[in-house]
Amino acid sequence: MRLRFFVRRLAMLIVSLLVASFVIFAAIYLAPGNPIAALSGGRSIPPESLKVLEARYHLDQPFLVQYWYWLTNALHGNLGISITLRENVSDLIASRISTTAGLVLYSSILIIAIGVGLGIAAGLRPGLLDTSILVVTAISASLPAFVAAIVLILVFAVQLRWFPSLGNGVGFFDQVKHLTLPAVALAISSLAIVARVTRAAIREESRKEHVQTAVSRGIPTAQLIWRHVLRNAAIPITTISGITVASLIAVAAVVEVVFGLAGLGAYLVQSAQSKDLAVVQGISLLLVGAFVAVNVLVDVLYAVLDPRVSLGSRAQ
Amino acid sequence: MYGKHTTLRLIAAVGVLGLLAIACGGRTTGGTTGGGLQLAVTTKAGTKPVDKVVWAVYRDVNSLDPIYAFDYPENTTDSLLYESLLRQAPDGSIGPGLATMTNPDSTTIVLTLKPGVKFWDGNPVTAEDVVFSLDRNTDARLAGFYPAVFNRVQSITATGANEVTIKLNKPDYWLIGELASIPAMIVEKKFTLAQGSNYGTPAGKIMGTGMYKFQSFTPGVAVVMVRNDNYWDSSVKPLVREIDIKGAPNDASLTSALETGGINGVYAQGLTTLDQLKASKAVTITYGPGWYTDAFIVSDLKGPLGDVRVRQALSLALDRKGLIDAIYKGTAALPKWISNSGTFGYGKSVFQAAYDSSPDMTQDLTKAKQLITDAGAAGKSITIGMSSELTGISIEAAALKAAAEAIGMKATLHSVSAQNFINFFIDPKARVGIDGFFTLNYGDYAGPEALPATFLLPDGSQNFDGYGVQGTDPNAADHAKIFQMFDDARGTADPNARAQKVADVEKAMATDLPWIPVLQPWVPTITSSNLSGTYSSFAYMFSPWAEKLGGT
């Protein structure tokens, strides 16, 4: 059963990657602009140099031939060479993974810790606390990451000077400091959504018969919440957290650009603009892979959280 | 030149009103602004040591190999790491660099390396390194961007341990300017060959002679360089220990980083937030002479623009003052010639006198209408290539359309995406049906011939309309005369005599208008207010602009 689940998921991943690679390749191919032009900032490159460069990157070949070159190389583990940087795409990507991974991880921790925390607090304590959390999350849920980023920079970097506004930093603590504002900007709206879903799930569970029975039997509050409310509310919370974290991988690009972080998302945007095909392909496929992986992880979590759910079938 | 980014930035940027923060004490020999204000070519030398300066460029650096340095980010970086054989001073004048130059006869250039010049690794710069570095430009396998510069070169040979002789097919005094620019930056042969195709990429290492030496190249982060304490000229002692060249992702990030000290300086190209920075106490803005020109490129001489009277009429009808205010908020000059007066790197007094005696290109609708009547061009239509996504280009195209309509012609705007705008420059198919398009363009050194050489010569890389070529130019014979004058200047040894001939060509171009100059922007240098000592002219693109940078 488990094996079949993983084999099926692996097959799905491969098909997703193949389809995505073709669609992305075609989209970039059809997009306006000339990748060689990005090298010169738009000055007229000598025609003889242009020819040599186009031949080097197979840009003078028809679309399908170009795709075939890319695909066969990729299957041999060679993701190609960046036109702008003349370096292996896999090396370029490797040097940026940690930034994006760090940002997404930092942000996920904020979302899950604060979002779930606020949701539980609001769910269990109706009244002023609940209302305040509802109001605050209503506002922050509607705040797009790029707006949050600009506000955070203005307040915490330009005015208060607590955090830097640009770049990655050197060493662990400096990097954490540099990633703080980006992670908050990225987390802020998702956090609100997670908090609201958690609140609703807690409320729903609290009203259920088995919880009422437990209350009447005098089970201690802590145990009641942990074993009877949270355990059952965990499935919807996991679902929304999984979706949110997976989407962070894509949304991170916006935040990386604003904060000048050397992450995959910012690099993807930059490469797409300069039509650096091999780089766009490499990063996109990595993101598709990560997205699929997070979803597999969520499915596994369902089974762990609720023994009634078997791998491969979605929880109801 | 207007590529995508350059265009956006240059155009949108220089938005600053009046109040020029001209650093006191800086040298101010770089020409004057329209209003008679002096532009500074350097800011006052720094006095205090500084540990680290982060300098922004408009995008990430792509390569550290000088044969691929063709745009602001690479030029700004390479000019600190490498040195050219001759060197351009902040005012554009050319003097010795790694070598001194003599001209035994008109087709021979002898370059003698200065004693003691050495690379970062301590190895002396040899004649062999020089020949190797120059030859890389024309090596087809490398596909560098400067082969055309060497088109009159017959041979480059080492004629001594410290001597290199360049033999020319025909006299070429323009090559001197190129020898003081990117194509003559020297790399170490042995080191470069060992690096192979990795040379200048993030995976590889580089070897230059500059007062700053390479430390790391991390795409998306920075190019890090540190002071070369073994610099061959021991009288030069830069005050800044480390310089990081960092691509700034966008104007908003750049601005907040300049205000918070995350970035300490930038040579701006079209910064939309310049007004905000001008109000900030955290930064100082200095304006210097630019070597670039914003112009309308005439790309088809078979249409209405083939008649010089139509070109003149459009030029007379164009509201340049309005464009200078609208796009550059007053920080650009009204042209008299195609070339910016900042480019007078030699024969200065000759150029300046000729320039001052030339008329400003001001608006005169009456004269323009008369020319259209004489040419019988009333009701004829032109098509302007533009991109509505590029703010400055759109404003210019609309202004030219208005000018054409004001004198009884018709004009159509042909808009393409920002990404595709570059195709007007590199793809002849994109120019079909287009009469012209706008550009911001510069040459490789401070000489008023450097830019026109790209579009006036029949084989010039930007001679899109076949100007002076039989078959594409109805007045090829007349234009061949201008070309002859230009060619004559190229072979004239005496700088003042050469300047006179180039000035005559500039005057002829100001009348014949192979390109229609629109305006000539200044260079805004923005630094943290506790820093000073950079070049503030366009020379930062080719020469060590941070040699006197330090704290104040």
Image (tube, rainbow, N blue to C red):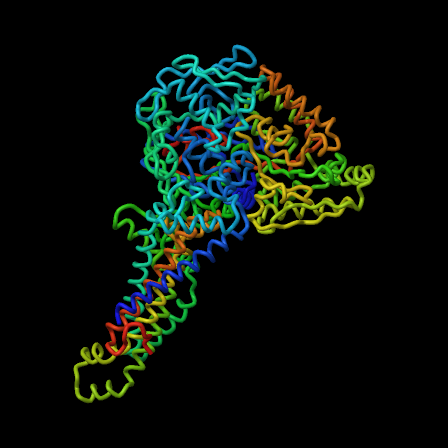
Image position, residue A233 (x, y; %): 28, 77
Image position, residue B215 (x, y; %): 32, 35
Between B328 and B231, the one lying in front of the other is B231
Which residue ends up furthest to the top in the rendered image? B104
Q: Is residue B166 left or right of residue B352?
A: left
Query: Eyeballing the image, is A243 above or below A157?
Result: below
Between B198 and B15, the one lying in front of the other is B198
Location of residue A218 by image quarter: bottom left
Quarter of the rendering occupied by the N terminus of chain A = bottom left
Query: Eyeballing the image, is A68 above or below B530?
Result: below
> What residue appears at the point 40 percent right and 57 percent down from the top-left corner?
A149
Residue B89 visible in the current orientation? yes
Q: Is residue A249 left or right of residue B284?
A: left
Q: Is residue B537 left or right of residue A152?
A: right
User: How many numbered markers are drawn?
Assistant: 0
Quarter of the rendering occupied by the C terminus of chain A = bottom left
Residue B282 visible in the current orientation? no
Image position, residue B83 (x, y; %): 42, 26
Between B394 and A49, the one lying in front of the other is A49
Location of residue B219 by image quarter: top left
Image position, residue B544 (x, y; %): 42, 29
Query: Eyeballing the image, is B301 above or below A286?
Result: above
Query: Eyeballing the image, is B1 above or below B112?
Result: below
